[in-house]
Each structure stands twice: as C-alpha cells, then as structure tokens.
Amino acid sequence: EPEVTQTPSHQVTQMGQEVILRCVPISNHLYFYWYRQILGQKVEFLVSFYNNEISEKSEIFDDQFSVERPDGSNFTLKIRSTKLEDSAMYFCASSGRTGAPSPLHFGNGTRLTVT
Amino acid sequence: KNEVEQSPQNLTAQEGEFITINCSYSVGISALHWLQQHPGGGIVSLFMLSSGKKKHGRLIATINIQEKHSSLHITASHPRDSAVYICAVSGGSQGNLIFGKGTKLSVKP
C-alpha cells in the first residue's frame, strides 16, 4: 500500500537555525498537511496545501513557517529561525485522490529537537 | 471553536475484552476521524465518519450527529491493540482537524 514518507526521522538543530522537514505524499493525492505534536500534548493542525497554495493555516503557522511543493513530489516545511518551543514531532499527511473529503494518510513523523 | 473531549484518558484491559472509547465534540462537524498512534509515534487513520457506523475487522466506529458523540469499539482485544487512540474532527475543510488528547489503551495478555 502506498505510504507517506518523511525525512529525516530525527533532526537536532540549534536555536536560530533554519530547518527543512521533508515529506513525500502519496502520488495522485491532492491535499497535503502538516501537523505538530509537542511531547505529551495533543496533535495540532499547522497548515493545509492544495493546488500549489496554502488553503488554510492555524495561528501557530506564523511567519517563521513556510511550505513548498518544489518538484511535484516533495512537500516541505521550513522553519526559518528555530526556537526551543519548536521542539516537537512534525507529521505530514495527504489525502484526496478525487477532491472529495477522504481519510488522511500520515507519515511516521520527524522528531525535531531544538537545543 | 470546537472542543473535543475523549474518555477515558487511560484504559487497561485484559486480552479478549470488549473496549469502548468515547469522543464528544461541541460544534457541528463535517467529519470525524479515529486515529491510532503507536508507541513509536506514527499515526494511522482507522476511520473517517460523517454518519452512522463503520466496521473494519475487530474495530467498529459509530457516530451520533445529533448528540455530537462518537464511539470506537474494539472486540476481542489483543495486546497488539495497545496504542493511543485519538479522535479528531473537521469543521469545513478536510485536514484542518481539532484533535482530542487521546486515550491510552493497554491490553494485558
């Protein structure tokens, strides 16, 4: 069965550095998402992406964050200047072959540690 | 803003027991998702519901739109069912989900 793949599985970075988290969604899916889960807390929506543009974003997704689909297969989340509080598990997901609401397919996550 | 409440927070069961996890939400939704999060952190989608009932193997999910309530049932539970089960709801657009805190299930052999 097709999978959403995320790399790296674990990223350690210093405060103030830029990080790029990478995701390869399921091919032919139309909708792409990023979520984060701070350790011990619930999962939170960050952003949704459709038709090569952001369709929705949460309050968490401020100017430090950006998303891109640079080559038609990868879907990236960039954090420009990381803060300690950005330490979390980041999940990518994709859905919707047909454009109708459909179940989400999640990647295994990237654990980001900011020191 | 929708609030999603799950109960119980923690659940310990003996192998073979019938398990029910509940989810309530405060505002009307377009869909409700049940997700399973493994100890390693990965998330798997179990069900997406907008009405009625769905069944997959030993898992059953139901939703009552009028009462804003959903349940996830596991029949003949097994230690491999041990995981965190998360309820999440979407209002208008798919993917913009509000998540519950999860129910940590431990099934003992």
Image (cartoon, rainbow, N blue to C red):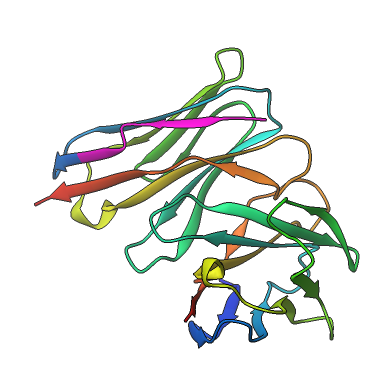
Name the quarter where the N terminus of chain B is drawn: top right
The outermost residue toward the top is B66
* Image height of A71 relative to B104, above or below: below
Q: Where residue B22 sits in the image (x, y, percent)?
A: 40, 28
* Image height of B13 relative to A87, above or below: above
Q: Which residues are magenta?
A: B1-11
Q: Where residue A103 sits in the image (x, y, percent)?
A: 63, 51
Q: Where residue A57 sits in the image (x, y, percent)?
A: 77, 54
Residue B15 inside the magenta-drawn segment: no
- Which residue is more in the foreground, A96 or B69? B69
- Which residue is more in the foreground, B57 or A9? A9
* Image height of A1 relative to B72, above or below: below
Residue B3 inside the magenta-drawn segment: yes
Residue drawn where x is 41% and y is 61% of the image: A39
Residue drawn where x is 38% and y is 41% of the image: B59
The quadrant in which residue B33 appears is top right
The quadrant in which residue B77 appears is top left
Residue drawn where x is 60% and y is 73% of the image: A4
Q: Where residue B107 sits in the image (x, y, percent)?
A: 18, 48
